[in-house]
Every structure is written in structure tokens, then in C-alpha cells.
Amino acid sequence: MNHSGHVEYTATGMPNRKLAIWLFLASECMFFGALIATYLIYQGQSLVGPYPEDLFDIPLTTVSTFILLMSSLAMVLAVAAAQKEDLKQTRLWLAVTALMGLTFLGFQAYEYNHFIHAGLTLSVNLFGSTFYVMTGFHGAHVAIGVIWLSSLFAHTFRPVDPKRRALDIEIAGLYWHFVDIVWIVIFTVVYLLGVGG
Amino acid sequence: MATVQESFPTQRAAILPRPKSTTGFWSWVTTVDHKRIGIMYAVTAIFFFLVGGIEALIIRLQLFSPDMNVVSADVFNQLFTMHGTTMVFLAVMPLSAAFFNYLLPLMLGARDVAFPRLNAFSYWLFLFGGIFINTGWFVNAAPAVGWFGYANLTSPAYTPGLATDFWNIGLQILGIGTLVSAFNFIVTIINMRAPGMTLMKMPVFAWTTLVTSFLIIFAFPSVTVGMILLTFDRLFNANFFEVAANADVVLWQHLFWIFGHPEVYILILPAMGIVSEVLPTFARKPLFGYSVMVFSTILIGFLGFAVWSHHMFTVGMGPVVNSIFSLATMAIAIPTGVKIFNWISTLWGGSIRFKAPLLFALGFVWMFMIGGLSGVMHSSAPSNAQQQDTYFVVAHFHYVLIGGAIFALFAGLYYWFPKVTGRLMNEKIGVVNFVLMFIGFNVTFFPMHFLGLMGMPRRIYTYDPALGLQFWNQVSTIGSFILAAGVAVYLYNLAVSLKKGELAGEDPWDARTLEWMLPNPPPVYNFARIPVVSARDEFWARKYEGAPAKEVAAGSEDEEDGIHLPGNSYFPIIMAGMITLFGYGLLYSGALAVAAIILTILSAMGWAFEGVGGTIIYPKGDAE
């Protein structure tokens, strides 16, 4: 009798936790939607500089964006390994994903540092307020994802039912991909279109 | 129904052990049982309902005649702000949540909600958030910006001090709890229905809960973002609503009402669900037009997101935008009107028993209709310009929220009281309760239509004698005390019936849905064996239409080993407490805020690695 291992009965066949994370992500769409909309409403409305075109370094942010995108690939490999119950590969790809997330956060810290030295603070103008709050909340989501992935990594050293572990990792993966997709939108709308237009 | 229990082995030593007691104070603090959590929601919500009611009575006293000095203008602002905030977020919503909690698993044939610990977490966030918002009263900093908190009244320049922060951060704490419970209920409804209960066989109350929860998960993020922006403005000098930095204060109105209008349906849909359960039971007929009722509910949910700007007709959005939102608003009257006709048709030709729950439900149908009709009047932008910010609007939304939501919630309180306690509410006192509330409500709020048309603005602490507003204001104040007497009679009835109420036995109302197949009150595990559903009104069909009384083991392969009940846990209250501590830290001490974040993360990990816990219970004496 192994209660921790048995798969619960559900009316749809989808595990409760997986359904819950999908609902959470649906709600998060509205959350980031409101943040990005606020940024766009205030775009070009700042009375004093610095302005986006003074600061954005597209090649640099392209690199950090690429790293975050590739971390989704690592995440997929971690989920696949967990589903094949391959513990070694699971550990490897969980670690790679978390490290890539950390690297992205490092780029963000560098960018913030650079911007602050160039005079862009939270209080200086509307661009500063909207930029830091929007990207800051995205960064906080990445940071939570890194903590989550690290916990799952540590958890691989405990005896857990493999099916349950695969589900745990799959759910974290859904969250991770979502956070990536939000960044694609922010990168496109804020960085690429923001400077080019 | 004797039971045998054995404790369930935990997987490993956790940070905190699973609490063991099943009775007494700590068993309630650590409970994860949806029935107990439902009771806690109800008791807390009724407490806050009384607080909000007392605030309203002071408001009415101040307006009894011109130039009264019961309270100062400042305190008056605090009173209407906290009255609105309390009634919406701390009374009506959590009272609806009390019904969701207690009833949904029973109606769906489930053992509990999908995530019992998260359910407890939601309750504690509600309690702590309520305390947080009300902290202002005790440190001489009660919020005074209205429940809508329009920018830039909320700027540090116009409301310095902590008052607006208590409101702003307190609502964010409440918002987390509400969102979490919405995820929980959607998963419960979609995933945990008894075998055979297709979506179109669910009780309408489950449908309205489902749609309400979807409204919550899509509407709350918008106001959350608004409040986060305001937090950054107030605490970290950002510019989101600072006009000097070229900010647009109307942004707040959009973020607020994109949430605020769906919120209206978040308040009223559960009430509609309750009425849709009460009317068929006391008319002894199935609900008329079940499918239409369901689709109207869904349609109201969709349209609810397309009408927010009708709260902003006088902002100056232009005729095209105003026309679009006018039309969308009028369109909502159609599914709502369909529901009214469905309820009336449910009664038509039924063998009606006029018990207290039915009286309140009938009061709902009639009063809600009046509120709905004045709502259609507001939907026309030109006439809205006349009514904006007058007492006509106050009359309108109290007809929907008291005549609508509160009457329906009282119907539910009377109807399901025997389910929760095993005793019936006193019927005679119940009738007195209804009559007083019905008369008091109409005497209070109907005159406000006249006051509004005479031009009395909302949110003013007094008025000039020459305006001729005194008579109807006095009528209204007298009415408010009759209404309060009605509520007092309810509390008296509650006390009397809890102690000496007639024993309900099984199925006291000759009801129709699954929850009444259980003993009153239900055992901790709800259903010993899960019923297999073949009809919409399953219990009725089994009693009178020869539907098969089939049941199955709980869908788990190890039923022979008994029913696994989830273990109690300290972590829901701890984590909710840490989040609340973070709120206080933001206002009082950065170090406390940082410590609270770390403790929140630690308690989340403690929660995640707590282990299974719980007990296995063997119900005895059930029919094999």
C-alpha cells in the first residue's frame, strides 16, 4: 500500500496539480498583460531622460534572451529524462536549466546596474517606473523558478515515486516555459519594437 | 456510525510534525477539513458583516438631518471607505466562500476540495488581511479614499501617513487568498465530480461557483497590478499615478474597473446559485430551464469583462467608447432577465412551502430585479451623466448587493443550517427576521432613488437644510435601524437554534441534491462510498423516480484499507502569517519585511516537504 505513489482519480484524467498550474498561468497572463499594457500606455510619455533609446543594448539583451530561451530546451530535456526515470540525466538538465536561469538574472543585474549609473532610477521618469517594475516582476518570477528547480534538484537525492517526480518536474516546467514566453513578449515589445519604432 | 482510526505513517521527519489533535482549539487552527473551514469563513464573514453594518449605521445617523455632528468629515470618509471595503471583501465574498467550502465537495460527491491545505491557507489570508485593513482604526490611520481608491487621491501628497497603505496592502493580501481559493474550486469542480456527474448534471450552485472562480482568476490580477503600482508609488517614489511626471490617473480607473465590474458578478453569481438551489426545493419542482440557466451564467461571466468602462462614462472617453460600453451593458440585462423568468417559472405550478429560506429567496428575486432595472437605467451614457455620483447609484447597488446578494446568502444560511448543525433554525423567528429585513431594507434604500434624482451627491458628510433633502434622509435612517433590528433577530435566532433548535433528522426539506443524502451534520469523510450519479437532481430521482442507488468505492484501488483523510497542518496559518508580516514590514521596518520574505520561502518549503500524514478511517455500519 503506497499512498504517496498512487495516482489520484480525477474526472478529467488530468492530475489536480497540473490543472491548477494551468489555471495559475492563465491568471498570470492577465497579471503580465496588465504590467506590459501599463508600460505601453506610458511609452514615450516621459518628460525627462534617460529614454529607452539612450540605454537599451539590443545585442547584449539578445544574448541573455537566447540563454533564457535555451533554458526551456534544457527544461524539456529534464522533463523527458524524468519521464524515462533516468535520474542522472534529470539531475543534469535540472541543474543546467537553473544555471541558465541564474545567468539570465546575472545579465539583468548587470543591466540594472548599468541603467542606474546612467541615471535611470525608479523615480526619475515614467520609463524608469514602468521598466523596473515590469522587468523586476519578471525577474522575480525567474528567481522563484530557480529556487523551485533547485529544490527539485535536491529532491532527486531522496527516494520518491518516479511517476510523482516526473509530474513534479513537469509542473515546474510548465511554469518555466511560461516565464520564458513572457520574456519573449517583453523583449519583442519593449526592446525591439520600443527602440526601432 | 462507529469508526476506527489509525494514524498514517509520515514519509520522513518534517520540520514541524503533523498536528494530531482532532478536537479543541488547535484542531481548528490546523484543520484542512473543508466543512470546518467553511464554518470558519461563515463566522468570520458574519463578524465583519456586523462591523460593516455598524459603520453604515453611523453614516446614517450623521445624515439624519442637516449639519449633524455625529462624526467629523474625516471620520465620515473613513466610515464609507471601510464600510464599502468591508462589505465587499470581508463580508459578502467570504460568506459566499463559506458556502463554496462547505457545500461544493458535498454537492459533487467528493471527500474534500482538491487542495485541502491551500484551502486553509486561503481562509487564514482572509482573516489576516481583514485584520490588516482594519489595523488603521487602532493606530489612528483608517483608510479614507473610498473602496475604489481613485488615483491621485491615493498619492502620498494627498493621503500621507499609513492609512492608504493599510487599505492597499491589505487588499493585496486578501487578493492572494481569493485567487488561491479560486484555483482550488475550479480544480475541485472540474476534477472531483462523482462518477456520472457530467458538467450538465451539476447543481447550478456548482456552475455559478465555477464561473465566479474563473472571473476571480482573470479579474483579480488587474487590480493587483494597480495596487502594486500604487505600492511602488507610495513606498518607493515611483511615478505611476504622479501627474507631475505626466502620469495618467485614468489608468488606475481602468485597472480598477477591469477588476471592479467582474467583481459585481463575483458577488452576485454565488447568490444566484443559492437561489437556484432553494427555489426548486421549496417549489418541489426541478429548476426551470437548467441549460439556459447555465449558459446565461457563462454569458454573464463573459459580458462581465466587456462593460467595465460604464463606471467611467463621465471621464470623457468619447461618444464611440461610451456607446460601445452602453450597448454591452444593456446586453447583460438579457441573460439576467432570462434567469429571473426561469426562477419565476420554477415556482409556477409548484407545490410551494413558504419556509424562511424560500421567503429570502423570493425577496432576492424581487429586490434584485429592482436593482437590475435601475442598472439598465445607468447603462445609457447620457442618463448616466445625470446619475453619476448621486444617491441614485447608492440605491442601485444596495438593491443588488443587499436585496440581491445578502438576501440570497440569508436564504442559504437558513436552508443549509440543518446540514451544518443538525438542527433547524426557528421558523417563526425566521419569518420575523425576513419581514424586518425586507421592510427595513426597502425603507432605507428606496428613498435614496429620490434623493439621488433630487441631486444629493454620494460621499458627502452633510447637506444644507435649504436643499430639501431632510425628509427622505430621515426615512432612510429610520429604515436602516429596522434593517439592523432584522439582522439582530437573525443573530438571536442563530443563538437559540444552535442550543435548542428542533433536531433536523435526515433530509428536513425533502431536498434534491447530493449533500442531503448525508447525515446532518455529515461525517468528517463525507461519503463513505461515492454515489454514482445518473440524474440532475440525483437525490430526488432516487427518492421518487426510481433512479438506481449505485455507489462506488472512492475511485481509489485500495478502498479495502479505509478512507485516507488528509492530515492537519500548521503550515497554512504559518505561511499566511508570514505574508501578512511582510505587509506590516513594508510599512514599519525593512528588516522585518526581508525576514518575512525569507520565512515565507522557508514555510513554503516546509509545506512542500511536509509528507503525506493524515489518518485512515474505516466507516462502519454502512449498507454493504
Image: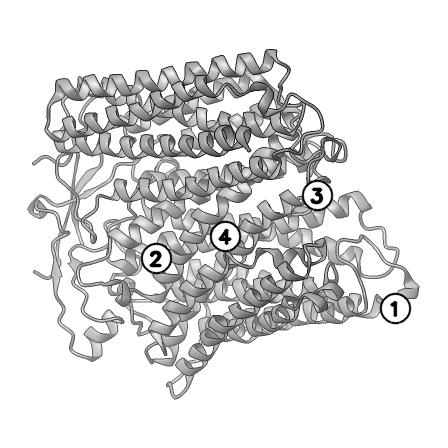
Q: Is residue B379 left or right of residue B157?
A: left
Other residues around mark 4 within 10 Å, as few (<14) / some (14–19) / many (≥20): many
Question: Sequence-wise, which precedes: disc 3 or disc 1?
Answer: 3
Q: Quadrant of residue A194?
A: top right
Q: Is residue B94 left or right of residue B54?
A: left
Label 2: which residue?
B103
Q: Nearer the viewer, mark 4 or mark 2?
A: 4
Query: Which element is circle 3 on?
Result: loop
Label 3: which residue?
B145
Question: Sequence-wise, which precedes: disc 4 or disc 2?
Answer: 4
Callout 2 amino acid: Leu
Q: Badge 1 sits on which subunit?
A: B
Question: Sequence-wise, which precedes: disc 4 or disc 1?
Answer: 4
Label 1: which residue?
B468
Q: Badge 4 sits on which subunit?
A: B
Q: Nearer the viewer, mark 3 or mark 1?
A: 3
Circles 4, 2 touching at the beta carbon (< 8 Å): no
* Labels 4 and 1 in the same subunit: yes
Callout 3 amino acid: Val
In the figure, B88 relative to B325: above or below? above
Q: Position of residue B462 (x, y in %)?
A: 84, 55
Q: Quadrant of the N terminus of chain B?
A: bottom left
Callout 4 amino acid: Met
- Mark 3–mark 2 Cα distance, whole angstroms, equals 36 Å
Other residues around mark 2 within 10 Å, as few (<14) / some (14–19) / many (≥20): many
Q: Badge 3 sits on which subunit?
A: B
- Mark 4–mark 1 Cα distance, whole angstroms, equals 37 Å
